Amino acid sequence: MAKVVGKDLEFWWDGKEYPVISANLTEAFDTLETTDSSTSGDGKDFEVGRAARSFTIEANMFDVDGAEKTSGTLTAGAKYRLTGGTLEGNSVIGSIFVSNGTGTASSTNKCVPLGSVLTGKTLGFTLGGIPMPLMSLDISIKYDTLDVTDSSTSGDATESLVSRGERESKVSAVVDSATQDKLSTNPTEQAGVVTIATGTTLTGNVIIVSKEISLSAEDYAKVDYTFKWKGAPTEVNMGFASAVEKSFKIILKRGASTNKEYTGNAIVTEKTISSEVKGLAKISYTMQINGALSYAVAN
C-alpha cells in the first residue's frame, strides 16, 4: 500500500498553483433525527442530510511574482509558474516547477518567476502618521457567513454567501518610557498603515480598543495593543481576496490509480496574517466550499 506524504501536496486557486505549508479538508454531514415508535430496541434512528464542506490553508507570504519571462535561459534552482507552452518537461499551465537551468523561455513557452518569501525584517506599522516600533503583528479578517442553501443547490451540498467583514489586529511592542501610551481615555480614530514589505500593505483607519501590559522582575515590559479597523481598509498583495468565490483544487498525490484530487468552488470567509520582526510572514485561510465537491484521479 502506498502511503501519501506531504511532499506531493498541490493547492490550486483560480487556475494557478500556489505554494502552501498545509491544507486541511473537512466534510461533515447533517444527521437528521428520525427516531420513532418503529425504531428497534433502545436505539435511535437518523437520516443523512446535506454536507458542510470547508478547508483551511496555511502558507508563507510571498512578494509579487516577477514579470513574465518570454526569452532567455531559466535560472537553475529558481521557482517558476508555467504560463504557456512547455518548459523543462512541464506542460500543465499554472503549475509551479523548480528550474534545472536547461529551459529557454520564448513567446510560446513562457513562465513567471515566483516572488520571494517575505520575512519580518521589513515589518512596520504607523499610527496617525507616526511609526510605531513593534515586535510582532497579527491581522484577522472574518466575514459574516450566510447560509443560502436552497433547492437549486447541487447534490448533497450546502451553499454560503458572505456579508460584512470584521477586521482586527494586535501589535506587540516593548514599552518605551519616553513614548506616550497609545491608549488612554476615549480613544479616537486614526490612520493606520501596516507594511509587511514594499508593495505588501494594509491601509485604513483604526481605533485602539484594548491594551495589556506585562512585566516581571527579570524581563522587559511588553505591551499588546488590539485595534479594530473602521470600514474596509485597502489591501495590497495581502493574499487571496476575501468574500470572492473561485475554483480550487487540492491534490494529495498524483498517479493513474489514486483517487486523491478534490475540486470545486470555494469562498474565503476568514483570513489571518501574522509576522514577527525575527520570523516569517505567514497567512492562513478558511474557505467555505459552495456546491458540489468532485473527487477525481490526479494524473
Image (cartoon, grey):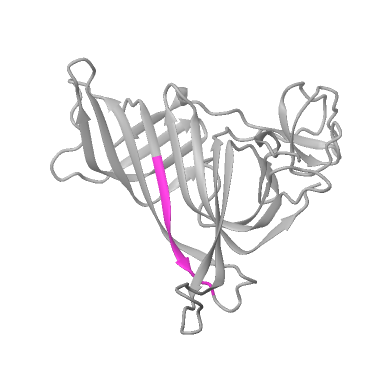
Left or right: where 266 falls relative to 45? right
Total label count?
Answer: 0
Left or right: where 262 falls relative to 123? right
Residue 130 visible, this orientation: no
Give whichever of 245, 66 is nearer the camera. Answer: 245
- In this rendering, the answer to whether 148 lies above or below 3 is below
Left or right: where 5 falls relative to 122? right
Looking at the image, which residue is at 51% across and 57% down? Answer: 243
Give x and y (percent) for residue 120. 46, 26
Give x and y (percent) for residue 169. 35, 41
- In this rendering, the answer to whether 126 lies above or below 39 is above
Give whichever of 293, 45 is nearer the camera. Answer: 45
Determine the residue located farthest toward the left in the rendered image.
Answer: 185
Determine the residue located farthest toward the top in the rendered image.
Answer: 218
Instruction: Say if the magenta span includes residue 147.
Output: yes
| Predominant secondary structure, magenta span | strand
Determine the residue located farthest toward the bottom in the rendered image.
Answer: 37
Give whichever of 105, 23 is nearer the camera. Answer: 23
- In this rendering, the answer to whether 137 lies above or below 186 is above
Looking at the image, which residue is at 27% across and 33% down? Answer: 224
Instruction: Say if the magenta span includes residue 44.
Output: no
Residues drawn in magenta? 139-149
Residue 248 visible, this orientation: yes
Looking at the image, which residue is at 82% across and 24% down? Answer: 73
Q: Could you say which quadrant of the image residue 116 lies in?
A: top right
Q: Quadrant of the N terminus?
A: top right
Give x and y (percent) for residue 236. 51, 41
Looking at the image, which residue is at 51% across and 52% down? Answer: 242
Give x and y (percent) for residue 36. 46, 82
